[in-house]
Image: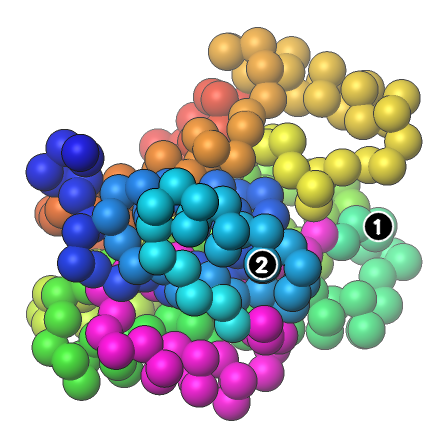
């Protein structure tokens, strides 16, 4: 039984990017806390695996195969929820290219998924929460890239910085209705998105990121999911417009 402040029994959560990585870990943890979880992702097989994991543990899950860049499909999926208490907008893609080699199509695709996809999810969630008079929680997924100027991460970092601005702006607009909006900005997390598909390169990158962390290691999806759960539940009832950084201490901004 979850601690009362972390108990989501009777509540409904919608998680984008739920087919793997941080999204899957978050969906599973929210279900363990008692929430009915609507899992959304473009990866239908991965989505099914997440739902099976939740159901096998005794939880309740619904699946929505969708592209978060399609505003209408996001609207229909969110509207299908009988109620909505939590939106975790986690879906995202990685792109790396030097500034001087960045193409329009690179920037457009990353902004479409990593910013517009989050915007659509936030808009539809807030509209439904307002219509249902629910004092809900919206959690967005930013990145440690917002605190650094990492080489090659112009598109990704710019999109995630836009997510931070969205988070703070929306928090200011809907707070009077009891809706909280916060972001999670992870450091280097071992997920399929950070997999370099080259064992030597992967080991080198993880070793580098581990040396940069006071904890001496990289993170796991389940550790970021704990941050999502905290922001989703009553334990963070007086927290809004904030950026929570599970980054192993790699960045320590004021």
Magenta highlight range: 65-94
Name the image quarter holding residue 171: bottom left
Q: Is residue 176 left or right of residue 245?
A: left
Q: Is residue 253 left or right of residue 190?
A: left
Q: Is residue 178 left or right of residue 126?
A: left
In the picture, which quadrant includes the C terminus?
Answer: top left
Which residue sits at x=76%, y=24%? 205
Q: Earlier in the sequence, mark 1 or mark 2?
A: 2
Residue found at the very far bottom of the displayed protein: 72
Give whichever of 87, 27 is nearer the camera.
27
Q: Is residue 167 visible?
A: no
Q: Is residue 238 left or right of residue 94?
A: left
Q: Position of residue 72 (x, y in %)?
A: 51, 89
The residue carrying mark 1 is: 98
Q: Position of residue 26 (x, y in %)?
A: 43, 45
The label shown at residue 26 is none
Give whichever of 99, 77 is nearer the camera.
77
């Amino acid at each position: 039984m979850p601690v009362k402040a972390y108990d989501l029994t009777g509540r409904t959560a919608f998680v984008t990017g739920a087919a793997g990585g941080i999204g899957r870990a978050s969906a599973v943890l929210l279900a363990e806390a008692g929430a009915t979880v609507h899992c959304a992702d473009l990866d239908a097989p991965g989505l099914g695996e997440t739902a099976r994991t939740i159901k096998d543990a005794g939880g309740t899950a619904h699946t929505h195969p969708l592209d978060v860049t399609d505003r209408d499909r996001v609207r229909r999926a969110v509207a299908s929820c009988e109620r909505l208490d939590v939106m975790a907008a986690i879906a995202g893609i990685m792109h790396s290219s030097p500034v001087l080699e960045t193409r329009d199509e690179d920037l457009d695709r990353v902004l479409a998924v990593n910013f517009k996809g989050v915007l659509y999810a936030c808009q539809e969630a807030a509209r439904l929460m307002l219509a249902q008079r629910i004092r809900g929680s919206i959690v967005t997924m930013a990145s440690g890239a917002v605190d650094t100027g990492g080489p090659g991460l112009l598109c990704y970092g710019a999109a995630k910085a836009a997510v931070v601005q969205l988070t703070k702006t929306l928090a200011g607009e809907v707070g009077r209705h009891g809706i909280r909006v916060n972001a999670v900005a992870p450091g280097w997390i071992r997920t399929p998105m950070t997999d370099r598909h080259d064992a030597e390169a992967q080991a080198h990158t993880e070793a580098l990121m581990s040396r940069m962390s006071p904890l001496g290691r990289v993170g796991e999806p389940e550790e970021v999911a704990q941050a999502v759960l905290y922001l989703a539940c009553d334990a963070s009832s007086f927290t809004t417009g904030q950026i929570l950084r599970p980054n192993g201490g790699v960045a320590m901004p004021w």
